[in-house]
Amino acid sequence: MQAVDQMICEVCMFNEHCYMGMCIANKEWQEEMRKTLFEVARGTVK
Ligand SMILES: [Zn+2]
């Protein structure tokens, strides 16, 4: 899901250094954030 990756990068600490679809943030951090964003998108987290 491309939109989620963009959202992840918008909140990542390097977003001034990342390009669309190529986030330089820590992979583990990205995975955690992806899980969180999917849960938010599904409405399981308020
Ligand atoms: Zn990024």
Image (spheres, rainbow, N blue to C red):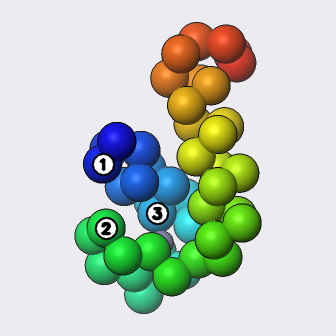
Q: Which mark is residue 2?
A: 1
Q: Dot 3 lies on which element? A: helix
Q: Dot 2 lies on which element? A: loop
Q: Position of residue 15 (x, y in %)?
A: 46, 74
Looking at the image, residue 45 sits to the left or right of residue 1; the answer is right
Is label 2 within 8 A of ligand 1 (CB to nearest ligand atom)? no
Looking at the image, residue 30 sits to the left or right of residue 32; the answer is left
Q: Marks 3 and 2, Cα distance to the nearest angstrom?
A: 8 Å
Looking at the image, residue 12 sits to the left or right of residue 5; the answer is right
Q: Dot 1 lies on which element? A: helix
Disc 1 marks a residue whose amino acid type is: Gln
Report crowding for label 3: few under 14, some 14 to 19, many 20 or more residues within 10 A (C-alpha). many
Disc 3 designates what residue? 9
**Contact (CB < 8 A) between labels 1 and 2?**
yes
Q: Marks 3 and 1, Cα distance to the nearest angstrom?
A: 11 Å
Disc 2 designates what residue? 21
| Viewer can see residue 17 | yes
Residue at point 61% right, 61% down? 30
- Note whether 35 is above or below 29 in the view shown: above
